[in-house]
Image: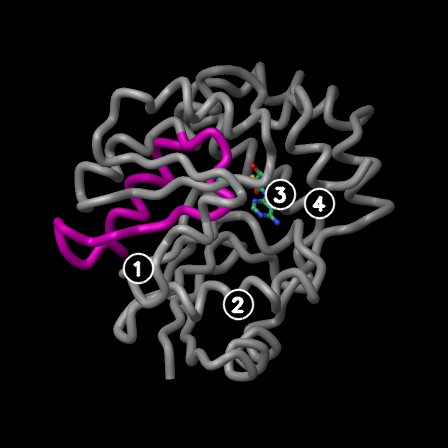
Amino acid sequence: MDWREFWNSEHSIYVNARHKTLHYDRIARDLVAYIPRPDATVLDYGCGEALSAASLAEKCGTLYLYDAAPNVREKLRGRFASYRKIVVLSTDGLDSIADGSLDVIIANSLLQYLQHREFEDLLDVWHRKLKPEGRLVLADVLPPDLDAIADVKALLDFAWRGGFLVAALAGLGRTFFSDYRRLRNEVGLTRYAPEDLFTLLSAHGFTGEQAPSNVGHNQLRMTFVARKV
Ligand SMILES: C[S@@+](CC[C@H](N)C(=O)[O-])C[C@H]1O[C@@H](n2cnc3c(N)ncnc32)[C@H](O)[C@@H]1O
């Protein structure tokens, strides 16, 4: 199994429904800050189940959702079929977005699951699709020194404040024996020091800066905003 297969499977990363709801609510609230205008055209790339996409879509003209996992896309199509502003893309659908047409591209909690080469290829695609003044938001990026214990602490803090601590403790027990832990140990997660990310961005025609806070509950991870040079 690789990360793509993992995200396409019935995993239990979200310890219960409340965790999943609070997670997507929180990221949608944080992402709204990156929508520049009510008519903005936005792509959420690697969007996952995007439970709160409707609230993000309220702040834009069009919200494109794309995820590599076919099972996730199926759920998205069912959930958002009646939403006029939300378009769920297939892999081919990405090509149908005109070059230079997007105001914002969001990639939240995605980079850690991509090999460098795949990320670099995506940077070129994203560069082509963004308007000259468009913004690329790379969020929930793991720094090199963040270990699994820090992620566990951040989850427990989120769970304590969200009222699902007992479920989180049970969920951590499940994760300990899960494919996630095995993949994290064997395949690993891709991490970036800010200066390395800036170098990569610059090699692909972007200039970037780190945002003062991360999108989502884990403030030990980082968000970067890049624009075309
Ligand atoms: C940790 S989840 C993040 C979901 C959502 N963005 C969030 O922040 O909750 C990572 C998602 O990225 C998707 N993904 C992984 N590799 C991808 C790729 N190369 N292209 C698009 N999506 C990808 C997975 O299918 C999964 O849904």
In this picture, is 66 found above or below 198?
Answer: above
Residue designated by label 4: 148
Could you tell me which secondary element the residue under label 4 belongs to?
helix
Calculate the distance from the C-alpha at mark 4 to the C-alpha at mark 2.
Answer: 27 Å
Could you tell me which secondary element the residue under label 3 belongs to?
helix
Calculate the distance from the C-alpha at mark 1 to the C-alpha at mark 3.
Answer: 32 Å
In the image shown, does 205 or 195 lie closer to the viewer?
205
Residue neighbourhood size for the residue with mark 1, other residues' Cα within 10 Å, grouped as few (<14), some (14–19), many (≥20): many
Q: Is residue 7 magenta?
A: no
Q: Earlier in the sequence, mark 1 or mark 3?
A: 1
In the image shown, does 147 or 84 lie closer to the viewer?
84
- Please give left or right for residue 175 compared with residue 162 in the image: right
Picture coordinates of residue 160, whole percent (x, y): 47, 26
Residue neighbourhood size for the residue with mark 4, other residues' Cα within 10 Å, grouped as few (<14), some (14–19), many (≥20): few
Calculate the distance from the C-alpha at mark 2 to the C-alpha at mark 1.
Answer: 14 Å
Between marks 1 and 3 in the image, the one whose residue lies nearer the viewer: 1
Picture coordinates of residue 90, whole percent (x, y): 49, 38
Q: Earlier in the sequence, mark 2 or mark 1?
A: 1
**Mark 1 CB lies closer than 8 A to ligand 1:** no
Quadrant showing the C terminus? bottom left
Residue designated by label 2: 123
Circle on res. 151? 3
Picture coordinates of residue 131, whole percent (x, y): 29, 69
**Mark 2 CB lies closer than 8 A to ligand 1:** no
Between marks 4 and 2 in the image, the one whose residue lies nearer the viewer: 2
Magenta residues? 24-50
Task: For the residues labelled 4 and 2, say whether their Cβ atoms are less than 8 Å apart.
Answer: no
Residue designated by label 1: 102
- Please give left or right for residue 10 compared with residue 219 in the image: right
